[in-house]
Amino acid sequence: MLAGISLCAPTARSENVSLSAPAGEVRLTVTGNIRITNSEGAALLDDAMLETLPHHTLETSTVVTDGVKRFEGFLMRDLLEYVGADGTMVTASALNDYSIDIPMEDFEQYDVLVATHMDGERLKPSGKGPFWIVYPRDNHSDLQDIRYDYRWVWQLIQLKVK
Amino acid sequence: MTRKSDLVAYIVAGTATVAFALLLVFSLARLLDTEAELRRNEGDNMLWAISRTQSAALLFDAEVSRHVGPISGKSAELEKRYNVMLSRLNLLSEGPQLRYMRDLGLDGELEKAARSLQALEAEILNLAYGDIQTASSVHEILQPLIQDLGRAGNQSMVRQWEATGARLDKQRSAIVQVIISIVAIIVLGAFLSFTMLRAMTEQQRIRLSLLRERETAEIYRSFVTLVSHQFRTPLAVIDSAMQRVLRSGSQMPGEEVKQRATQVRSEVRGLTSLLEATLDVVRLEERQVAATPGNCRIEDLVQRVIARQSEDAPERVFSVEVGNKVPQSIVTDRLLAEQILDNLLSNAVKYSPVTEPIAVSVRAQNRYIFISVHDRGVGIPHEEQDRVFSRFFRGHGTTDIPGTGIGLSISSQVARLLGGELSFESQAGIGSTFTLKLPEEWPGTE
């Protein structure tokens, strides 16, 4: 009932562009201040939708693994543009109840990857999947700092734009 | 001897420079070490990973129990807890975490738990109400794991605190070493700067003494030239007078002998005064001349000097003009002041035509009195004016006028001794004005 009323109300949300409903399993949910949605204030994204984002590869070492790993996925910047995000902060939440605020300027300043694959293998929920936020740590010495290490959210399932 | 001490100085300075550089490198290295050390924070991360794994195990165990019990849960939640559990176990089984767990002797347990859980995966994901057997199997796997992780957490904390303590000790000692090095660097730097300054001062001293040596050599050369010139004429006069006396023998009238003797004595007097003047210079140089201040009436001073000059040159005309602000008397050394004015007046007499008057004027300004002697004589050419007060200086074209070139040099020095100054203005062919400036009050210790 309430949802119906709010849909009819001539608010700023009237400019929202709708996104087709996910056909497959929802892997990532983006909520908060976004313009493009396919659910009540949220963009529910399946693999097929995420595969439309430009594919990127990044090779870097991480603080929890040995050696240089090859990550594949899409850029956080592209994802946020895809859902029409407008804000300064993104709260990233993980399957393991980890939740952290990341300034959105990180994604402008660096090519921050939402990794789907590591060394050619799909990240699984029993590992670091379904998604792992990966910073280009080896390319920027200022990212080699514990204040960036905690932004590497693995088992990422939800983003909230603020 | 000097060579040897030079060598020692070089060795000391060289060693100090090398030590300086080594200390700098050493403190830099220690600082870099410490900086790198500060970036290491492995322990914190491990404690966190262990505690999260323990919490994941507890939550998973609870979810499994709930699933088989009367309060049933959603299967999606069970799958999530299962995945998180495995994810945590996987995290502890790779990279730096694995090495840490191996150190704690827990790596085998973790791997075993992960394998056992994965073996039960199908049963876990399809867990149904009352499936107590699977639930107990899971519990049997998780229970010891939870205990192990608890112990590992404690151990990890202890290790972390120990490591932090040791790291702080190391950093503290590094900082102390760096501080000591910096103090040593400062001391060495001060030593090197001091050595360098001393060397520069020494060099300057040597340069000055060389300059003085050269000046002295120049003075002696001038002196020899002067002596040969100034002494030759009187000596020739004396020699010829004596020759006459010798040649004439007893035939020379007593009157002429007397005249010759007087002539010789006069020449000897001249030579003596020449020597006196030279000795004056030496005494002044060695500061053996001391001024004795006393009240001195200016009128008397000027009149006495003029009277003396008139005696020697009765044909000359002297005029005196005293400004109205001039005090009656000043405090100075009367004899030395007279000596200067004698010199100035006799110069005026010597270097101006007999027909020209000589004027003495006195004026006062700013607690100083200025006694000037004007002549209308030969003057001093512009290019020679710089050297007027230097010793043995004789003006160009004045060498046939008797003089030593010492008078003005002495006068100028004596004027300074009295706290005053000697200056002049002159134009070749027009005349000269020499001015003695004297303080009205005695200037103290000088």
Image: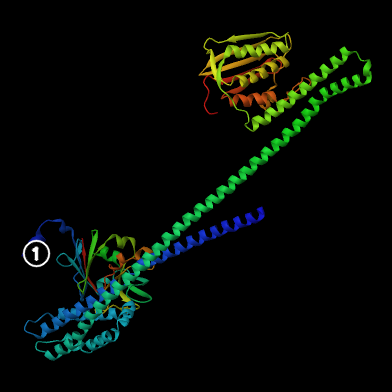
Q: Position of residue A73 (x, y in %)?
A: 31, 72
Residue named by callout 1: A3
Q: Is residue B125 left or right of residue B19?
A: left
Q: Is residue B21 left or right of residue B216?
A: left
Q: Residue at x 61, y 57 (%)?
A: B8
Q: Is residue A150 left or right of residue B239?
A: left
In this view of the protein, can residue A136 be seen by the observer? no
Q: Position of residue B339 (x, y in %)?
A: 65, 20
Q: Quadrant of residue B27?
A: bottom left
Q: Is residue A136 above or below residue B376?
A: below
Q: Amino acid at mark 1?
A: Ala
Q: Quadrant of residue A105?
A: bottom left
Q: Residue at x 56, y 50 (%)?
A: B196
Q: Position of residue B86 (x, y in %)?
A: 24, 81
Q: Secondary structure at mark 1?
A: helix
- Count of labels in the image: 1
**Other residues around mark 1 within 10 Å, as few (<14) / some (14–19) / many (≥20):** few
Is residue B296 or residue B215 the one in the foreground? B296
Is residue B351 or residue B235 the one in the foreground? B235
In this view of the protein, can residue B424 be seen by the observer? yes
Q: Is residue B76 above or below residue B310?
A: below
Is residue B28 or residue B253 the one in the foreground? B253
